[in-house]
Structure formats: C-alpha cells, structure tokens
Image: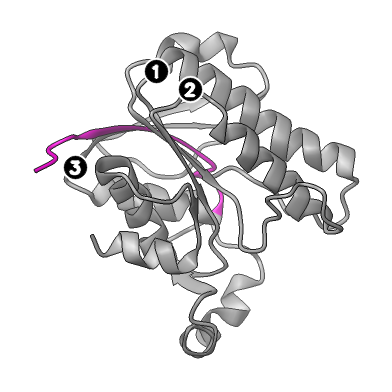
Amino acid sequence: MNNERLKVILTGASGMVGEGVLIECLQHPRVEEVLVVGRRACGHTHPKLKEVILPDLFNLKPIEGQLSGYNACFFCAGISSVGMKEAEYTRITYTLTINFAETVSRLNPDMVFTYVSGAGTDSTGVGKTMWARVKGRTENDLLKMSFKAVYNFRPGLMKATQGQKNLLKLYKYFAWMYPVLRAIFTNLACTLREVGLGMINAAIYGFNKNVVEVKDIIKLADL
C-alpha cells in the first residue's frame, strides 16, 4: 500500500478552481501541509495551511527558501483569454507557469506537478483557437521537465464546493443547471471536489495518462 503523505504547493487559491482544490487538500488525511503562493490572500485559515503573498509571481527569488521540501504542486492559477492579445495571454499563461515550474522542479526533484489546463486544449499548439494552443504549448513543455510526473488536468464545466468564497461572477446564475449539464454532457462536467481529489490521488498513486480529461478526473477521484 502506498502510504505517502503529500506536502503541496498550490497556486490560484484566490480563484474558483484553486479554492476548490485547496478545500479538498485541507480536508484530506494524506495531505500533511499546503503552501499557498499567490498575489493576494486566499481567505482561508487551517492548521495545515501556510501562505506566502507575492505581488510578482514572475520573480520567485524572494521566496525560494520557502519552496523546498514539497512533493506535489497543484498549479491552478489562470485567467480568461477574453479580450486579451495573444502575447499578453502567453506571458501570463505560458511564461508564468513555466517559470514557476522550473523553480519548483529545481528545488524539489521528486515532485509531482499538476497543471490546470482546460477541456479543448490543443496539444498541437498550432490550432486556430488562441487560448487552446497557448495552453497546449504549456502542457507540452511541462511534460519535458524533470519532475517525478506531470499531469495536465483538463476540466470543463465544474460545480463549486459548498462554502467556496471565490466564485466566478456568472457561476451563481448557472449553478442550478449543473445536474442537467452533467447528465447531458457526461464527458464535460465534473465537480471541483472531483478535481481536487483527482489531483491528490494522482500525486499519491500515479496515473497512466499525462493528459487527464474529465472522464479521467472522475475516475481518479474514486480511487
């Protein structure tokens, strides 16, 4: 039996996906510690939780001393591409992620790195949809890094966890539709609880796919 306990670095905890994953980490008996790294406070307190506020996530030098000793990273930071030019979206989506990953991989050679991408991501990196090709390029370059394992999670429609504070503005208007959407789009809808549990279980037990689609997330959550 795998008795490994996780010490997790988590980004994006002030956003909807990251907060959902954080809640699962704090509740999970196999997660020993969570270090949240972000530009602003996540709004949660817990005996397992440590938090570092860093206004410029492109420069991790000031906190490098606090980033070692971890065996998992759940990179949930991200932004919408709506209204953005490709260069700026690439800087925030690709460059920021790769810079962060390079730092934590250097400091933690046996780390499992999980990246929140999205359903419809373009693995070729050359498709017509801007956000999809940028995320595809990000996924591909993460897989080249010297982590113990890399998992690119591609969630689609997600149901928030009860008690979440950081919800997308439009979420409260569409949350009631989730049961219907899950019934119709079985391969596109999952809960944030399943996303969080899927990440934890992949880090503990491993998984046979590096690209983790919605159906795989649901499967992982049930391990």
Give the residue displayed 48% in from the left and 14% down from the top: 106
Are the residues at dot 2 and dot 1 in contact (C-beta closer than 8 Å)?
yes
Lower sequence index among marks 2 and 1 = 1
**Mark 1, residues whose alpha carbon is within 10 Å: few (<14), some, or many (≥20)?**
some
Amino acid type for the residue under numbered disc 1? Pro
The region drawn magenta spans 1-15
Front in this rendered view, residue 21 or 185: 185
Amino acid type for the residue under numbered disc 2? Ser
**Mark 2, residues whose alpha carbon is within 10 Å: few (<14), some, or many (≥20)?**
some
**Within the magenta stretch, is there residue 8?**
yes
In the picture of the structure, the residue carrying the numbered disc 2 is 146
Give how far apart the Cα atoms at labels 3 and 1 are: 20 Å
Residue 39 seen by the camera: no
- Coloring scheme used: one colour
Classify 133 as above or below 95. below
Percent of width and height locating residue 107: 44, 13
Give how far apart the Cα atoms at labels 3 and 2 are: 24 Å
Residue 86: which quarter of the image?
top right
In the picture of the structure, the residue carrying the numbered disc 3 is 30
Q: Secondary structure at mark 1?
A: loop
Q: Secondary structure at mark 2?
A: loop
Amino acid type for the residue under numbered disc 3? Arg
Give how far apart the Cα atoms at labels 2 and 1 are: 7 Å
Lower sequence index among marks 3 and 1 = 3
Front in this rendered view, residue 20 or 182: 182
Give the residue displayed 59% in from the left and 42% down from the top: 77
Residue 102: which quarter of the image?
top right
Q: Which mark is residue 109?
A: 1
Percent of width and height locating residue 37: 50, 30
